[in-house]
Image: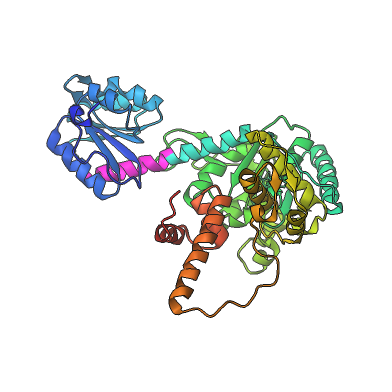
């Protein structure tokens, strides 16, 4: 189908930095002005002039936001509204004077806002931005809950080294203590990145009474700060712009299961105070509500940061640190787990072979020495990634040290003298390789990769552009 047949604006599809907006409006001049203004702000826009065209275009253009006029040549915009809402789009209706009853109906059917004509373009832009915030909010909440559904899938804390036996013993003991207490003590899991803190938290949940109850994970590092409060504590309808309905927060969603606060070191100070209050009083108050609700959940937090040091320097509340650290589990770095390194390497290689129908793996003697000599700064996550990759590249299941492609474990040799230019390109190549490695580790999650490298998301984006790395 030709887009032109649908009466779609010439500049139908532009850059795609922000939401996709569909404008269903038969006043062509006004619609064109809207498209121009939105495109200037980086939105991807499509414009159609009738209900039928709107129905057709959504087969190839999935809008995040729909600006819906009420009076259209082939019917009333309200007829189409439920279809957009059902598809998860945010709908803003545009009405002429005297159509207020339509606007009320539209809101009842799920529109988030209505604007009276003549419409000021800046007001329209503001309304879209508000709608986006509300939509992101509900998406991230749904995302957190969706993760919860997979909480107990594939929880395997492999390893028999003394260090891991100790961890498993601690998990069993803490699970008993936590299960027997009506006010369960808080558990803090520490350890370097990739050591298995997430796995340990899930195993702890599964070892506790009520393990069939929710395991709700909150990633304090990846949730935008402005969403975090309502995510955690919930909100009442109308508590803030975009709060279209009441929503329980994740603390409530955990019921009498587990609330897992991952990367707790990243929780903003203002929310640390609120969290402390919840832990001390065992009640939660949704934003905009006066009602306090009991919190029966057990709290488990994890961090790869030194919270003690952070609390000494004022970057983390000392009282919250003590409260969280009532019981602690420390995940040992992989390099201190002796024979577990090869056990895990063999496990990940066999797992990849099964998954892709490859020949059973066999590590050459050199590969075993390389795996054991390497320091594994990214711990189990790095081992899993390298072995999986090597397994996919190797021939007939034979994994060599070349397939593993680990950075040289021998002391570095002095670099040959280079010209300024070659220094520059060596530097560029190294930067590109580091970016790619961290992006691969984080499955191309740009925010997480930026965090791991200790740079801002903007800088990360800039560097990705510079090296032409695309997600
Ligand atoms: N003992 C283990 N047995 C099997 N798989 C493990 C083990 N430890 C970690 N893994 C795997 O390694 C990867 C990283 O583990 P996990 O996410 O739990 O680390 P983490 O310490 O929470 O990392 P981060 O601090 O970066 O959040 C996951 O794929 C996990 O399944």
Residue drawn at point x = 64 percent, y = 48 percent = 390
State which quarter of the image contains the N terminus. Answer: top left
Q: Position of residue 166 (x, y in %)?
A: 85, 50
Q: Is residue 360 magenta-colored?
A: no
Q: Position of residue 386 (x, y in %)?
A: 64, 51
Q: Residue 57: x and y, percent?
A: 28, 28
Residue 305 versus residue 64 in the image, above or below: below
What residue lies at 64% left-to-right and 60% top-to-bottom? 317
Q: Residue furthest left?
A: 29
Dividing the picture into quarters, in which one does residue 391 lie? top right
Residue 11 rendering spot, x and y as whole percentages:
21, 41
Residue 280 can be seen in this image: no
Residue 181 horizontal side relative to residue 423, left or right: right
Q: Nearer the viewer, residue 414 or 297?
A: 414
Q: Residue at x 43, y 60 (%)?
A: 467
Instruction: Determine if the magenta segment contains residue 122.
Output: yes
Q: Main secondary structure of the magenta part?
A: helix
Pick whichever, 48 or 464, lies toward us: 464
Count of numbered badges drawn on the protein: 0
Which residue is found at the position 85% from the left and 48% from the top?
Answer: 165
Magenta part of the protein: which range?
A: 120-135
Give residue 296's quadrant in the image: top right
Judge from the rendering whether residue 316 lies leftward or rightward of residue 116; answer left or right. Answer: right
Near-viewer residue (252 or 465): 465
């Amino acid at each position: 189908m030709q887009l032109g047949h649908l009466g779609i604006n010439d500049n139908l599809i532009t850059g795609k930095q922000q939401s996709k907006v569909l404008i269903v409006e038969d006043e062509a001049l006004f619609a064109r002005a809207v498209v121009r203004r939105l495109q200037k702000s980086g939105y991807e826009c499509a414009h159609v002039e009738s209900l039928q065209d709107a129905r057709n275009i959504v087969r190839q253009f999935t809008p995040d936001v729909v600006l819906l006029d009420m009076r259209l040549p082939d019917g009333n915009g309200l007829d189409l509204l439920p279809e957009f809402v059902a598809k998860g789009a945010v709908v803003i209706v545009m009405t002429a004077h005297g159509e207020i009853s339509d606007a009320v109906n539209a809101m009842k059917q799920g529109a988030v806002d209505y604007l009276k004509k003549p419409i000021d373009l800046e007001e329209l832009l503001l309304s879209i931005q508000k709608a986006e915030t509300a939509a992101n909010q509900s998406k991230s909440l749904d995302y957190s809950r969706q993760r919860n559904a997979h909480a107990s899938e594939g929880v395997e804390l492999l390893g028999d080294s003394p260090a891991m036996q100790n961890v498993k013993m601690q998990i069993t003991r803490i699970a008993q203590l936590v299960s027997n207490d009506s006010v369960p003590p808080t558990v803090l899991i520490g350890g370097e990145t990739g050591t298995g803190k997430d796995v340990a938290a899930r195993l702890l949940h599964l070892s506790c009474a009520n393990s069939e109850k929710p395991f709700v994970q909150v990633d304090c590092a990846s949730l935008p700060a402005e969403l975090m409060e309502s995510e955690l504590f919930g909100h009442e309808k109308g508590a803030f712009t975009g709060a279209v309905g009441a929503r329980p927060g994740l603390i409530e969603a955990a019921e009498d299961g587990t609330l897992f606060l991952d990367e707790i070191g990243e929780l903003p100070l203002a929310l640390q105070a609120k969290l402390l209050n919840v832990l001390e009083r065992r009640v939660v108050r949704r934003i905009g509500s006066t009602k306090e609700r009991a919190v029966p959940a057990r709290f488990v937090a994890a961090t790869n940061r030194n919270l003690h040091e952070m609390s000494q320097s004022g970057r983390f509340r000392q009282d919250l640190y003590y409260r969280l650290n009532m019981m602690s589990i420390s995940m040992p770095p992989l390099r201190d787990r002796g024979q577990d390194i090869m056990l895990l390497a063999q496990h990940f290689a066999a797992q990849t072979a099964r998954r892709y129908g490859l020949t059973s793996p066999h590590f050459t003697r050199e590969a075993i020495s390389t795996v054991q000599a390497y320091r594994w700064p990214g711990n189990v996550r790095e081992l899993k990634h390298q072995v999986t990759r090597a397994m996919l590249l190797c021939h007939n299941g034979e994994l060599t040290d070349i397939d593993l492609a680990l950075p040289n474990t021998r002391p570095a040799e002095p670099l040959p003298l280079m010209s300024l230019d070659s220094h520059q390109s060596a530097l560029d190549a190294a930067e590109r390789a580091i970016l790619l490695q961290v992006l691969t580790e984080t499955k191309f999650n740009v925010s997480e990769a930026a965090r791991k490298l200790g740079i801002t998301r903007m800088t990360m984006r800039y560097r990705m552009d510079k090296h032409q790395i695309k997600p």
